[in-house]
Amino acid sequence: MRGQRYSGASPTGVIDRGGAQEEICIHLCRLKELPTLPELAARMLEVVRDARSSAKDVEAVIVRDPALSAKILRAANSALYGFSQEITTIEHAIGVVGFNQILSLSLSISMFDLFRTRRLDLQGFWRHSIATAMGAKWLAQEAQLPTEVSFMAGLLHDIGKLAFASLWEGAYFRVLRLQHQEAITSCEAETRVLRYPHTGAGGVMAENWSLPADYVQAIRYHHEPTQAAAEHRALCALVHVANFAAHEVFPSLFAHVWEEARLAEAQSLAQLPPDAFDRCMAHLKEQAESINTFLMAIQ
């Protein structure tokens, strides 16, 4: 709910260092259960990082997986990109959509397949993630930050929630219930139930996957951008703004309590104008059909 006041623990949900040794062991054991990046997605990262890579190199990785290839082509032909000519090959998709967008698609599709739950609505989760990515890309133009990096940071920002919901579905259902019953942040509810917040778990997972520092920082600090490394604060703040714009436009079970003051601080940190949040929401409302089409394409 917009502007709902919250005065509880820090959004990062940092665990008290004086906690019982048994609890610390539990946290570490749970983090060790975090999944590894699928082999194909890991290979994709290696290829894209190599400055010598060409469209052919990227294509060679993707075509090894026919299901992934089909989903990428569906997504590239969706209303989100709006190309007038049908894209029929992966090479063509890379050429017109771009390396970074294809990387984002590959990672999101891989994670969609990696994480499954029976009781929780991950459709709402993915809709929020895609909307955050689109909002971050739009805001990046205002803040003069790299648009494709911002898109991917927005797409990946909540992977810690995704891992929690998939690995410990029953416990995460209790997290969501507690969050809504007591109107507390998702990070505090997670820390009370799981003893660790999604921001920290997502950051660990991103580091284990060897994701670029931009994404690791955005995942770990999108609720507290002032805590990010100086060179990443603007991106983390931008994702913070996009995150809550997406929650406002597409409410879901995974919504997060937030504060007007923190939003204003993030807009200032990202050097966004005061009306950026409202205009970002308007942009997402206009793109609602494209977001839903894109979501259907990557499933």
Image: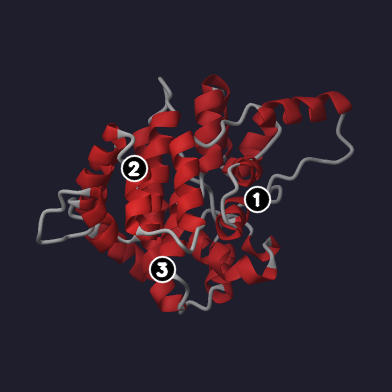
Task: Identify the residue shown where x is 84% and y is 23%.
Answer: 22
Give the mark nearer the N terminus: 3 vs 2: 2
Task: Identify the residue shown where x is 19% and y is 51%.
Answer: 78
Foreground residue among 266 and 126: 126
The span from disc 3 to disc 2 (Cα, nearest Å) is 23 Å
Residue 96's image quarter? Answer: bottom left
Foreground residue among 238 and 174: 238
Task: Identify the residue shown where x is 69% and y is 33%.
Answer: 192
- The vertical placement of 165 against 50, above or below, is above
Give the mark nearer the N terminus: 1 vs 2: 1
Percent coordinates x, y for residue 253 in the rendering: 43, 36
The span from disc 1 to disc 2 (Cα, nearest Å) is 38 Å
Furthest residue toward left: 85
Amino acid found under the numbered disc labelled 2: Ile
Q: Which mark is residue 11?
A: 1
Q: Which mark is residue 62?
A: 2
The span from disc 1 to disc 3 (Cα, nearest Å) is 26 Å
Amino acid found under the numbered disc labelled 3: Thr
Q: Marks 3 and 2: CB-CB under 8 Å?
A: no
